[in-house]
């Protein structure tokens, strides 16, 4: 799919706070993620130039096309944030009306705005007016089963000048549980005059193809299925082209893992980067022979050298067979 003059492709990495930071996005890009998003950035935090907010906004040339995602409920502040972010030259600005987290929803942000269509409309209009960049939004299908309103919200967003909408096919009440309703997303797609991106339960080439075909959506996002499996994008592209895909062998995975941690160290320093990397290491190594016994040590790694030592020990467990086929 295209927005303005930018080709965005159709297999996106979903925005994933606490997971899809710049190093991980670079790794996903290398494996064929078409478009990626920053972790969500608070417009309040931006106005205070909060250190963590500034760090979250960092991205590299390799990550284009990239969307920076903002959240907040004050139209003026959101507009100011959009102007600030424009200076970083992302390819689009996305507004988060999908977040279910209590600390955000209780303050009227994220998905809570789907219950306040007027405020949501004012935010969207203010952001669209504030920037020349394409503006998109991410929503859910509704608040709960009794309040499914993605169709109405999409029409409001379209009227405000939003150029595409991503829909997570779950309600606020579902959180991240249960099945994502592709039917509801399809219903919105049929009525919408702007591109629709589907989010929820895209976990493989087969599900990506089915989601695109069943809903007619312009693109799909891969969310939690990317944990430890950044090559899923290559697998999906291969599937869509009817080509074979082979899971990387241990040697290649080892290099991906070390590149990932090294990119983090380059920007955050070893201590913080390795600490944040622990969960990725647990995901990368899930299902490898002998990893269960190593898990406590994996979850405590503190230096790059310890990451390498873990990989060496796992490599020994593999013995002569380098392949870890069957690792999902
Ligand atoms: C850990 C985590 C962090 C997330 N962070 C964001 C975020 O910052 N912005 C956003 O719009 N959605 C966020 N999401 C929602 C995902 O983008 C996606 O819509 C959701 O996980 C459903 O897709 P899935 O079933 O493929 O995981 C997050 C989800 C998870 C699990």
Image (spheres, helix red, strand yellow):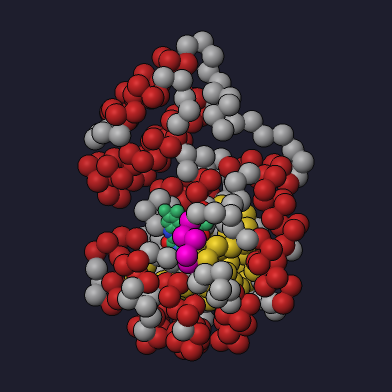
Q: Quadrant of residue 6?
A: bottom right
Q: Where is residue 221? Give x, y as percent.
A: 58, 56
In the displayed orientation, state which residue is furthest to the top: 320
In the displayed orientation, state which residue is furthest to the front: 146
Q: Is residue 179 visible?
A: yes
The answer to whether 300 appears left or right of 161 in the picture is left
The answer to whether 12 appears left or right of 256 in the picture is right
Q: Where is residue 93? Give x, y as percent.
A: 48, 72
Location of residue 55 with respect to 291 vertically, above or below: below
State which quarter of the image contains the C terminus.
top right
Q: Quadrant of residue 49?
A: bottom left
Q: Residue at x 34, y 28 (%)?
A: 295
Q: Residue at x 63, y 58 (%)?
A: 220
Query: Along the line of sight, which residue is nearer the eye, 41 or 140?
Result: 140
Q: Residue at x 66, y 60 (%)?
A: 182
Q: Is residue 134 visible?
A: no
| Count of numbered badges drawn on the protein | 0
Q: Where is residue 214? Give x, y as percent.
A: 74, 58
Residue 300 painted magenta = no
State which quarter of the image contains the N terminus.
bottom right
Location of residue 55 with respect to 47 vertically, above or below: above
Q: Residue at x 41, y 19 (%)?
A: 290
Q: Where is residue 251? Give x, y as percent.
A: 49, 25
Residue stretch rendered in magenta on the structure: 172-176
Helix, strand or loop for the magenta stretch, by majority: loop
């Amino acid at each position: 799919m295209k927005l303005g003059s930018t080709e965005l492709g159709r297999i996106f990495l979903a925005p994933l706070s606490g997971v899809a930071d710049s190093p991980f996005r670079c790794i996903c890009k290398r494996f064929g993620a078409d478009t990626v998003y920053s972790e969500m950035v608070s417009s309040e935090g931006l106005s205070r130039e909060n250190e963590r907010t500034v760090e979250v906004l960092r991205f590299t040339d390799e990550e284009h096309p990239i969307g920076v995602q903002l959240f907040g409920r004050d139209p003026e502040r959101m507009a100011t944030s959009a102007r600030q972010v424009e200076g970083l030259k992302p390819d689009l600005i996305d507004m988060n009306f999908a977040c279910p987290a209590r600390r955000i929803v209780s303050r009227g942000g994220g998905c809570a705005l789907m219950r306040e269509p007027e405020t949501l409309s004012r935010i969207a209009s203010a952001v669209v007016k504030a920037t020349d960049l394409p503006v998109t939004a991410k929503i859910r299908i509704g608040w709960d089963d009794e309040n499914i309103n993605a169709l109405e919200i999409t029409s409001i967003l379209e009227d405000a000048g939003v150029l595409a909408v991503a829909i997570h096919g779950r309600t606020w009440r579902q959180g991240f549980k249960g099945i994502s309703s592709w039917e509801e997303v399809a219903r919105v797609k049929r009525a919408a005059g702007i591109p629709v991106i589907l989010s929820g339960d895209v976990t493989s080439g087969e599900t990506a193809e089915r989601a695109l075909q069943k809903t007619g959506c312009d693109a799909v996002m891969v969310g939690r299925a990317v944990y430890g499996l950044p090559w899923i994008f290559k697998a999906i592209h291969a599937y869509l082209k009817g080509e074979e895909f082979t899971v990387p062998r241990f040697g290649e995975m080892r290099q991906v893992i070390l590149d990932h941690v090294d990119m983090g160290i380059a920007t955050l320093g070893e201590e913080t980067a390795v600490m944040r990397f622990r969960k990725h290491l647990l995901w990368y190594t899930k299902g490898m022979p002998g990893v269960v016994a190593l898990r406590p040590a994996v979850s405590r790694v503190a230096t790059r050298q310890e990451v390498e030592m873990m990989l060496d020990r796992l490599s020994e467990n593999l013995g002569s067979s380098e392949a870890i086929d069957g690792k999902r």
